Image: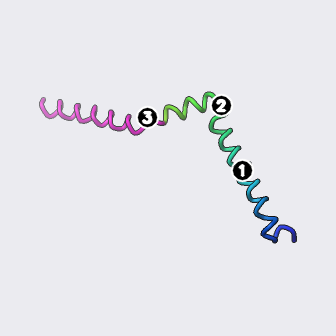
Amino acid sequence: MWFSKPENTKPVALIIFFVTFVGIVLYVYGSKNRSKRLETYRDIPFLDEQQGERLGDQKDTKDKQ
């Protein structure tokens, strides 16, 4: 019955969410290999634009031939 009282559930929920948040942060930034891999993901939008430009250039050369 102690869990059904709001004054007891709020601190318990806070602890659960805090532990979850710390676990996610440690998971993401804990490993150097994972950190390097995540750093490469930040360039993905720019890579799509570069690949699109290359494909557009190839189409232009095919049309000219």
Q: Distance between the residues labelled 3 and 2?
A: 20 Å
Quarter of the rendering occupied by the N terminus? bottom right
62 within the magenta span:
yes
Name which residue lies at 17% across and 30% down: 61
Residue 36 percent across, percent down from the top left: 56, 29
Residue 26 percent across, percent down from the top left: 68, 38
Give the structural element (helix, strand or loop) at label 1.
Answer: helix
Residue nearest the viewer, comparing 55 with 22: 22
Q: Indicate whether 55 appears above or below 19.
A: above
Q: Earlier in the sequence, mark 3 or mark 2?
A: 2
Asked if marks 1 and 2 touch (Cβ < 8 Å), the reply is no
Q: Indicate whether 65 appears above or below 19.
A: above
Residue nearest the viewer, comparing 14 with 52: 14
Badge number at residue 4: none
Residue identifier under label 2 = 31
Magenta stretch: dominant secondary structure: helix
Q: Distance between the residues labelled 1 and 3?
A: 30 Å
User: Disc 3 marks which amino acid?
Assistant: Asp
